[in-house]
Amino acid sequence: MSEDEVQKLLQQHPHLRTYMENVSKKVKQPVFYHRLPFELKEEVYPNLVYPTKGDVFVHIYRTKGMDEILYHAIEPTLNEREKEKYNRVLKLILEKAPEKKSVISDNELKEVLKE
């Protein structure tokens, strides 16, 4: 991935920018890829970032002091307003769930959710 593409990603995804600022204190700047390169599977000390779905990225790295390769998901966090909304929805689900019948299939779940 070109430096311009990396800079654009960092501008578009504040959570990625914040993560990179924090992790740069521990490891060198990782190499960014459009997708996980198969040819790097044998890399002993990888240090790379690639996008997954949506706003989620994965940082794969290992330094000489580490026993294993670390796979770290870089994802946005909820702000306070979103956390409040999430908690209200979760509370409603927990209140209403015991009243609903058990479901096994996706179709049954869709029917219960329509109620």
Image: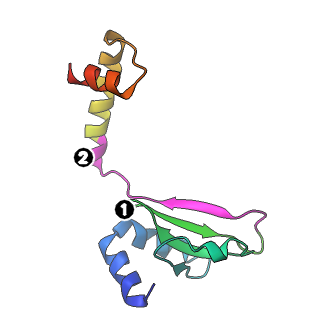
Residue 113 falls left or right of residue 97: left
Disc 1: which residue: 55
Q: Image quadrant of residue 3? A: bottom left
Check disc 1 and report its element: helix, strand or loop.
loop
Q: Residue 27: x, y in percent?
A: 62, 77
Q: Residue 72 or 115: which is nearer the viewer?
A: 115
- Residue 72 sits above or below residue 22 on the image: above
Q: Is residue 74 magenta?
A: yes
The magenta-colored residue range is 66-83
Residue 26 shows in this picture: no
Residue sitting at x 69%, y 70%: 62
Looking at the picture, which amino acid does disc 2 mark?
Answer: Arg
Residue sitting at x 30%, y 73%: 12
Check disc 2 and report its element: helix, strand or loop.
helix
Disc 2: which residue: 81
Q: What is the quadrant of the N terminus in the image?
A: bottom left
CA gap, disc 1 to disc 2? 19 Å
Q: Farthest bottom residue?
A: 3
